[in-house]
Image (cartoon, grey):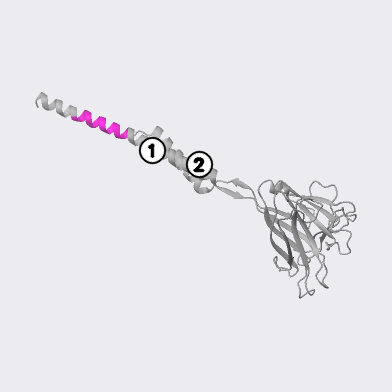
Amino acid sequence: MNRVRVLTILGSAALGTVSIKRRGIMARRLLIVLGIAVFGSGFALVTGTTTALAHSYDFTSCAQVITSPLCLVNTQLPGVVSLPFTTEGDTVTADGFSKLGTPLGGGLFIKNEGPGTSQNGLGIGSQINHEIDDTEFVSLDLSALAAKGITSGTLSIESISTAANEPPGELVQVCNSGLNAAFCTASTFNHTFGANGGQGDPDTWAGTVDWTAGAPFLQISGVINGAADSDVLVDSLVAGGENVSVPEPGSMALIAMGLVGLVFARYRKVF
């Protein structure tokens, strides 16, 4: 074999080796780019994925009243005109007033006659049946929720008889107010409802209510309707929640794939 052919063969081999190494470097770079892209996509999905924490307030027991010195079920609480109910770290304070704007001497009353009775909820202690009639109202301070952008929820009212049970049927007025002790002032939500069996009981109303940051007090009162009584109970309020970042399994898988690609590109030699 002559010298020229030997040099040609050696040169070709060298060029081939350089070409292979160059392809290996390009492959590693490609893996790095893909790893970063996958990792970034997974991270974006994780930080962008949100869920809403529901705030469920139960006014039929003392379970959520954790800061009040006195809370008893089926017991008149003279002078106790304010009860704080707390869930998910946010407090809704219930206050009782007369329509004249004065605190109630008989205080608030948590009535609970058991499941299936439709006689459970927050009422007024001075009444014979411990419910809320047309001369009084319970005001729920929802300012803590409004501050987080939560301005709607599902309110449940009990002991509101249908026309079949108590003609022509009981009514309840629900409104929001700019002042705690002033009924329905600066109201953007003000409606009168009848029983609709929204919770499966014949004497329960449940529906969507709204409030605003400027008028965060949701107020409930009985309404005179012919021969029907005008006394009701505040059962519960379920409000929407603020947005909270929660990683999804698929997003976490993308991040894991991206990390694996980066590690592989760093330590794996491609020939």
Q: Position of residue 58 (x, y in %)?
A: 75, 56
Q: Is residue 46 above or below residue 132?
A: above
User: Is residue 254 or residue 226 the one in the foreground?
Assistant: 226
- Quadrant of the rendering where the N terminus is positioned: top left
Q: What amino acid does circle 1 point to?
A: Leu
Task: Please tell me how many numbered marks the rendered image carries.
Answer: 2
Q: Answer with left or right where residue 194 lies relative to residue 43.
A: right
Q: Answer with left or right where residue 132 lies relative to residue 263.
A: right
Circle 2 — which element?
A: helix
Q: Which residue has dot 1 on it?
A: 31
Marked residue nearer the N-terminal end (1 or 2): 1
Q: Residue at x 36, y 37 (%)?
A: 30
Q: Residue at x 61, y 47 (%)?
A: 243
Q: Position of residue 196 (x, y in %)?
A: 71, 69
User: Is residue 120 or residue 1 the one in the foreground?
Assistant: 120
Q: Residue at x 83, y 54 (%)?
A: 96
Location of residue 77 (image quadrant): bottom right
- Quadrant of the rendering where the C terminus is positioned: top left
Circle 1 — which element?
A: helix
